[in-house]
Amino acid sequence: MILTAIEEIATRGDLIDRCISVELQPIPEAGRKTESEIRKAVNASAGRIFGALLDAVAHALRAHRDVRLPLLPRMADFAIWATAAEAGLGLPTGAVMAAYQRNRADGNETALESSQLATLVIALVGERGEWSGTAKDLLRAVDGRADDWARRGKGWPQTARAMAGALRRVAPNMRKAGIRIEFSRAAGHDRQRVIAMSMAPPPALEASADPPKTGGECPQVASDDGRATTGDGPAGSADNRTKEVEASDDPDGSDDVAGTFVEEVET
């Protein structure tokens, strides 16, 4: 599935973690093309593009069983198959996961920035170092910090139960930002549900771990900046690819489109 929009489409953490977001750069007027020009360029390059894709698929089929990633993201199959295709795409070992983890980190920031609750809770824990109490206590604490606009927002929790649910939704994103969150029950007769939060070092990105291991003796082609280099290989090879960018006209004239590739969402 591909979703496109001017603004961010995915803002909830559970969806963002199943996405690959791509922000396209504005196309200057001097660089725009008509649809017929784009189709002509794509058709002229179709053979080389298709051949490059087949090269990538062939490498992935040969190497995917040998891929060993230090940690598996939620889109585990994508990570394994894309890593297995690196050599066929002319990418250095580990390039896919490094880019994917940067994308996930950006997505985590988007999720936190889109949540007034997360912003206020992070500020609360950051000031105190730690916080513990019931969902009702937390609602009272953050309600006093929120302005009228935030409290009137559609997603603002109005009850303790809603607060607990909202916090659970953003908890994975907050943990990645360095906030430890635990949900438990207190000892005693009433067994109250307790939320405990404290500051913690943010978990290291998977990309910082050992590079993935893949089988096969596929050639690796890389430049100093980590991007694949292109050569003078035969048509249809992974070293002789043509990139075409389609022009589009947005209502504001900026041609700024955020595209999101979405994996099937679990229900």
Image (cartoon, rainbow, N blue to C red):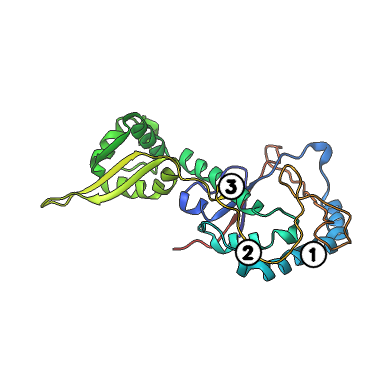
**Dot 1 corresponds to which residue?**
50
Residue 81 — which label?
A: 2
Residue 261 shows in this picture? yes
Residue 78 occupies quadrant? bottom right
Residue 159 at least partly seen: no
Please tell me whether mark 1 sits on a helix, a strand or a loop.
helix
Q: x, y (%) of residue 209?
A: 55, 50
Taking the spot 72% from the left edge, 66% from the top edge, the residue there is 59
Picture quadrant of residue 129: top left
Q: Which residue is mark 3?
A: 103
- Residue shown at 53%/63% (left/top)? 264
Instruction: Give the class, few, some or many, for how many residues have Cα within 10 Å of label 2's Cα (few <14, many ≥20).
Output: some
In space, the residues marked 2 and 1 are separated at their CA atoms by 18 Å
Name the kind of residue labelled 3 in the image: Asn
Tell me the crowding category of disc 1: few under 14, some 14 to 19, or many 20 or more residues within 10 angstroms, Cα based. some
Say few, some or many: other residues with alpha carbon within 10 Å of mark 3 (under 14 / 14 to 19 / 20 or more).
Answer: some
Q: At which x and y percent is residue 25?
A: 71, 40
- In which quadrant is the N terminus drawn? bottom right
